[in-house]
Amino acid sequence: MATTATTPRMWNGGRSPFNLEYGKLMMWYFLMSDAFTFGAFLISYGTTRFATNGWPNPNKVFEKAPFIGGGFPLVYVSFMTFVLIISSVTMVLAVHEGHKMNRKGVVKYLILTIIGGLIFLGSQAWEWTHLYMEGAWWGRNPFPNYDGTISTTNFTNFFFTITGFHGFHVFSGVVINIIMLIMTLKGTFDKRGHYLMIEKAGLYWHFVDLVWVFVFTCFYLV
Amino acid sequence: MEHTLASLAEEQHVGGGRKEIYRVTIILSVLTALELGLGFAMMYMEYESLERHLFKGIILILMLAKAFYIVGYFMHLKHEIRNMVMTIVVPLFLFVWFIIAFLSDGNSFRNNKNKWDRDHKERSLQQMPVKEEGTHKLE
């Protein structure tokens, strides 16, 4: 008997050795694989950027914001970043309420999370539309490099591909959260006796926020 | 089965709590504000200057700190069992090699091309014609 009374015998069967429910563990492994997908995108972006002479200045490209006009670099994207962080916080709070089996709390925070996601998607739609109007799209880059030399289309190609792929994740996250909201309202989780499903949706939503941390830094700051 | 799931949900309730959530929220906001502050400061630096690269490095470190707080506290990984954490984190260390190998590959590709392909170097020195505000809009 190597195990003492204080250490639970995790590998003797009858319980999950990782102390995690199957679905949650698989969500983690899915997210790990998704991290590799986004990582591959960002590394190819980095490689291409290192292999290119000059690069457009993000402070010149992303200087416009709705209502206040041009000349405000970083302002709009900071707004988007904070919206996503706050929606991540409300999602943690929804999971927290789920632990306490408080249906009303879960509904409240899920709605707030969905609203945050929709604001983010709307902001991204505005930014894409604005850039498209400026003449930027896949294969078209109207922005010169820092030193005024002719830029390649690498910048716009990677920008639209990666923020588009992230935006698609946000979109599917919002859809998943709406499904969770409907299931909560119908009382499905109360009948099951646990809110583990909210935790899995929460993991996905936090991952979307996590990816934005990297995308935001790589495209707007660095 | 249902009973074990419910008990799993019970057991996982370690750490966390509203206080921790608010604390991490504040940390994440402060880190983001710091990043933005550095980003604004960088606008006044010379392109490709040493201090600019230094600031970029600091921003990347802050980015990793933010990732740690999101994964560790919001995604609860810090309170999971160590064996499980390792199955997630260890594969991600591949990125260390990815970053070193691919970025240096891109860098040497640029250097070689500039060195051996004269046209390429000259083309990349051409100035882009300055356009008036609004004239490059699609219509």
Image: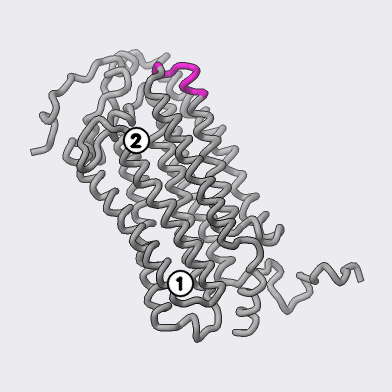
Quarter of the rendering occupied by the C terminus of chain A = top left
Asked whether A167 falls inside the magenta stretch, the response is: no
The residue labelled by disc 2 is A74
- Crowdedness near tag 2: few (<14), some (14–19) or many (≥20) residues, C-alpha within 10 Å: many
Q: Quadrant of residue A133?
A: top left
Q: At which x and y percent is residue A7?
A: 82, 67
Residue type at mark 2 is: Leu
Q: Give the farthest residue toward the front.
A: B19
Q: Nearer the viewer, residue A108 or A169?
A: A108
- Crowdedness near tag 1: few (<14), some (14–19) or many (≥20) residues, C-alpha within 10 Å: some
Q: Nearer the viewer, residue A207 or A194?
A: A194
Residue B44 sits above or below residue A196 on the image: above
Residue at the image point whose x is 50% and y is 33% from the top: B59
Q: Are marks 1 and 2 in contact (CB under 8 Å)?
A: no
Magenta part of the chain: B46-54
Residue B59 sits above or below residue A33 on the image: above
Residue mark closest to the camera, 1 vs 2: 1
The residue labelled by disc 1 is A105
Q: At which x and y percent is residue B133?
A: 14, 27
**Chain under numbered label 2:** A
Quarter of the rendering occupied by the N terminus of chain A = bottom right
**Circle 2 SS class:** loop
Residue A213 sits above or below residue A196 on the image: above
Q: At which x and y percent is residue B40?
A: 39, 28
Q: How is the image coloured?
A: one colour
Residue type at mark 1 is: Gly
Total numbered circles: 2
Residue at the image point whose x is 59% and y is 38% from the top: B96
Asked whether B47 falls inside the magenta stretch, the response is: yes
- Please tell me which of labels 1 and 2 falls first in the chain: 2
